[in-house]
């Protein structure tokens, strides 16, 4: 959305704000709910009354200081939101009070009123449920862009989606299956029924013979492997690629690192990307490549989110919302995500 010198408007309503605050590293139950003034929109920014905010693995990582560039304490968590603009700051055009928007500010969304940069907004159509709308923001755009912009997988090709039961994985699986792609999805065995229902062939990511099982299902190799675990498991993904295939690494959530060591888990992935892509340039990989993906706001983000909202409104895509929680239940919700057992997206409704 473009910016110019423009009007500042009084925020609508006088209700007080409430926000979840993380004051120190610790368990999710230690998060506090605090009253706060309703923010005023700064230059290039807007205030949004939040209808729904996403709960994601990013917050788990931030709490343990394992997220890339973790925020300092205290901070209000919340990677993404959907809501209605109540105030537009100086220099913002193309956005008006009353507009329904999605935003990916990366933190600050677990609140009733959030102040966010206008440049990270995307329009949200009326008629879509707020929890379903927010499930498509970070997770949906990540899934869409990895599949259609980065890997460019075609119908009838085979892919492996790790964590096909998770927030990103469910959407990636549903989008790929809808596109006629043969999806093999890993998940813990208790979730295989749900993964199958999304259109994938489920496998246990802990199975020692996983590559053999994948080769049985996709004898010609995989057009893409989507991996959020990283570490040495990337070698397994690389070994299963067909000529011309791509290994997409979109996080390194491999366990074994201490709080605060947020950079170290990513080193094995970066090292492999460097070596394999160098070999590719030398023609030694049969066209196989590795890409690292990180979701960014911008024109592509708005366009891809819009495409998914159209699919959701037409009934072609069902954003998998696992459960809705009140702000007071943020700690409980995060604990549930950390304990596993969730299929799809957990959402806060302020
Ligand atoms: N790069 C980006 O821009 C970007 C954007 C969004 C998210 N992410 C990252 O994507 C990852 C997934 O996020 P999310 O919100 O979807 O998390 P989530 O809902 O917690 O899902 C995590 C998934 O990982 C699976 N899993 C656990 N251990 C595994 C293993 N060893 N091998 C394969 N799968 C395993 C889980 O399966 P079970 O529950 O069945 O055990 C679950 O389905 C996170 O690491 C997040 O940080 C990256």
Image: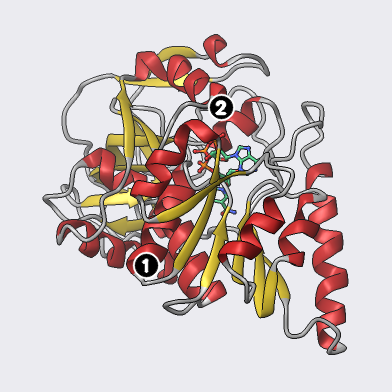
Q: Do tag 2 and tag 1 residues touch (Cβ < 8 Å)? A: no
Find the residue positioned furthest to the bottom.
283
Is residue 269 toward the left or the right of residue 299 in the image? Answer: right
The residue lying at 56 percent from left, 27 percent from top is 75
Find the residue positioned furthest to the front.
216
- Classify residue 240 by image quadrant: bottom right
Task: Give the residue pinned by disc 1.
Answer: 304
Is residue 150 toward the left or the right of residue 299 in the image? Answer: right
Quadrant of the snapshot with the C terminus = top left
Task: Give the residue pinned by disc 2.
Answer: 75
Q: In this orientation, does residue 341 appear?
A: yes
- Classify residue 325 by image quadrant: top left
Picture coordinates of residue 238 (x, y %)? 75, 65
Q: Is residue 285 above or below residue 77?
A: below
The residue lying at 26 percent from left, 57 percent from top is 317
Secondary structure at numbered mark 1: helix
Q: Is residue 24 above or below residue 305?
A: above
Q: CA distance from mark 2 to mark 1?
A: 29 Å
Secondary structure at numbered mark 2: loop
The residue lying at 21 percent from left, 39 percent from top is 10
Picture coordinates of residue 201 (x, y %)? 47, 54
């Amino acid at each position: 959305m473009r910016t110019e010198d423009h009007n500042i408007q009084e925020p609508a309503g006088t209700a007080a704000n409430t926000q979840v605050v993380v004051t120190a590293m610790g368990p999710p139950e230690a998060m506090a709910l605090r009253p706060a003034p309703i923010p005023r929109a700064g230059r290039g920014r807007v205030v949004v009354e939040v209808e729904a905010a996403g709960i994601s693995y990013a917050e788990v990582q931030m709490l343990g200081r394992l997220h890339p560039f973790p925020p300092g304490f205290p901070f209000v968590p919340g990677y993404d939101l959907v809501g209605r603009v109540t105030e537009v700051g100086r220099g913002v055009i193309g956005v008006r009070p009353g507009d329904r928007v999605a935003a990916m500010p990366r933190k600050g969304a677990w609140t009733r009123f959030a102040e966010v940069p206008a440049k990270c907004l995307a329009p949200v159509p009326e008629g879509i449920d707020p929890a379903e709308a927010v499930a498509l923001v970070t997770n949906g755009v990540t899934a869409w862009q990895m599949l259609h912009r980065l890997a460019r997988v075609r119908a009838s090709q085979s892919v492996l989606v790790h964590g096909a039961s998770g927030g990103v994985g469910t959407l990636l699986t549903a989008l790929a299956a809808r596109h006629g792609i043969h999806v093999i999805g890993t998940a813990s065995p208790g979730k295989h029924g749900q993964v199958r229902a999304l259109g994938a062939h489920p496998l246990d990511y802990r199975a020692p013979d996983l590559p053999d099982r994948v080769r049985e299902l996709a004898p010609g190799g995989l057009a893409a492997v989507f991996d959020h675990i990283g570490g040495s498991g990337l070698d397994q993904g690389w070994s299963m690629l067909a000529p011309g295939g791509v290994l997409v690494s979109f996080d390194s959530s491999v366990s074994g690192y201490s709080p605060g060591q947020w950079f170290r888990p990513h080193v094995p992935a970066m090292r492999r990307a460097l070596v394999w892509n160098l070999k590719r340039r030398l023609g030694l990989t049969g066209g196989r490549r590795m890409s690292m993906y990180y979701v960014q706001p911008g024109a592509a983000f708005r366009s891809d989110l819009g495409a998914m909202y159209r699919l959701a409104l037409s009934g072609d895509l069902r954003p998998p919302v696992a459960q809705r929680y009140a702000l007071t239940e943020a700690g409980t919700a995060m604990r549930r995500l950390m304990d596993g057992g969730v299929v799809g997206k957990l959402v806060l409704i302020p």
